[in-house]
Image (tube, rainbow, N blue to C red):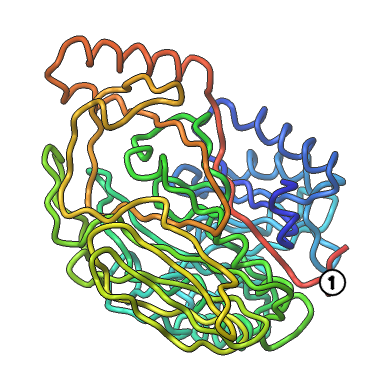
Amino acid sequence: MTTAQAIGIDAFALNCASIDSYTPTQLALAYQAAKQVNFKVFISFDFAYWSNGDTDKITAYMRQYANHPAQMQYKGAGIVSTFVGDSFNWGPVKQGTPHPIWALPNLQDPSAASSGAARSTDGAFSWYAWPTDGGNSIIPGPMTTIWDERFVKALAGQTYMAPVSPWFATHFNTKNWVFICENLPTLRWEQMLQLRPSLIEIISWNDYGESHYIGPYSANHSDDGSSQWAAGMPHDAWRNLYKPYITAYKSGAVAPIIEKDELVYWYRPTPKNVACTGDPLPQPNGVSMLHDSIFVATMLKKPATLIVTSGSNQPVSIEVPAGIVTSNISMGVGVQKFSVTREGKAILGGTGGLEIKDNFDLRKENYPGSHCNPLGQRISFALFQSLDFDLIDEDVALDIPSYIADLVKDEKVKSDAEAFLRKLFARYLGNTLFTGLLTTHTDIR
């Protein structure tokens, strides 16, 4: 929470499911922790698990937390949101909760806002933070504000909580696609500074499975298999990139103010067409629309020259103005080098945390643990994304999904992997999903 506060985030949305026995305990701990550091939280009921028949249970949670010292308040009411849950009626919940509630459900279709009065809603939250025609359809970028505009129009003055997200890539057997959002970390914020929605929710703080986390990667979570593409892929530098945009949004500025020169870069460590030996799944849907590019955001007080050497490619020099500018450079296999010069002097520089490779080597010795002990074979695929920030060095330990252990033919390696998993899961159970919310200070109590 203090890490989120450091970049200007005011609250976490606590995504919770009805089927998880640990939900009451985890909610209580989250509210308690937020109170201790003067942070705010609110509940987001995940209607992939809740139903319209759960009114009494939802009311009980709101009665418990709507007036909690750590509850996020908006216009004097406790915020509550959802994932889907378009048709849920908030009227009985409001009637059963002494403290006012500000209901901002996630609507899949903005036109549903026209029936908001019948469902006692106060606005809506959109999940369309990536280029899409709706649902999970994948279209070429760039991202536009067409969905935002539809929501604003349909809400007719009610509160719009807009989504911001840096990325989306997932590789489960039931969910296997990538949205085309390679320049989204800065483009989406530029759109928000023009649109100026009442509230903004960042998707997400720690959803590793969909690869859009901006919080620190934690090995201490129940692994659903996403460690294949999240472990060793820090996204911390996106927080540095987000901070001046958050400051600008909350102050009403139309552009971020840069107080010190910084450099942020992100890329996949393989070209998009590289095949992954041993991967039981096909390439994610949408891969063909990706670009084999390196993305670099310069955050500069004054103009300078960006120099990028991508693998064996010749160095590329780009004159960049002051402010935040995202440039893209053709991807080359090998080491990724970045530097910024001004008036002939180097002011920033760094080397990417991962080389770009055109093949995979799955031998177990290539994946050591934190004590240099081999953890066993690990499946890779061509949608890993890497992000590195100048002068940051991450100490990463890798997790192994259980179904990877089943693919390993070496019995010793397999038994070691299974033992590791048993130890991991025995120690860490019951972690809830957080998404970040930041808001204007207006109307916040």
To which residue does mark 1 refer? 443
Q: Residue at x 20, y 62 (%)?
A: 272
Instruction: Please tell me which residue lies in front, 285 or 116.
Output: 285
Q: Which secondary structure, mark 1?
A: loop
Q: Quadrant of the C terminus?
A: bottom right
Instruction: Please tell me which residue lies in front, 356 or 73.
Output: 356
Does 39 appear above or below 100?
A: above
Residue 163's image quarter? bottom right
Residue density around tag 1, few if under 14, some if 14–19, many if 20 or more, within 10 Å? few
Residue 117's image quarter? bottom right
Does 57 appear above or below 299?
A: above
Q: Residue at x 48, y 14 (%)?
A: 426
Q: Residue at x 25, y 45 (%)?
A: 174
Instruction: Please tell me which residue lies in front, 287 or 83.
Output: 287
Left or right of residue 403, residue 99 in this image: right
Left or right of residue 420, residue 216 in this image: right
Question: Total marks drawn?
Answer: 1
Amino acid on which disc 1 is placed: Asp
- x and y percentages locating residue 330 in the rendered image: 27, 75
Does 276 appear above or below 136?
A: above
Residue, far front: 344
- x and y percentages locating residue 86 in the rendered image: 50, 62
Left or right of residue 350, residue 173 in this image: left
- x and y percentages locating residue 95 in the rendered image: 76, 54
- x and y percentages locating residue 127 in the rendered image: 48, 65
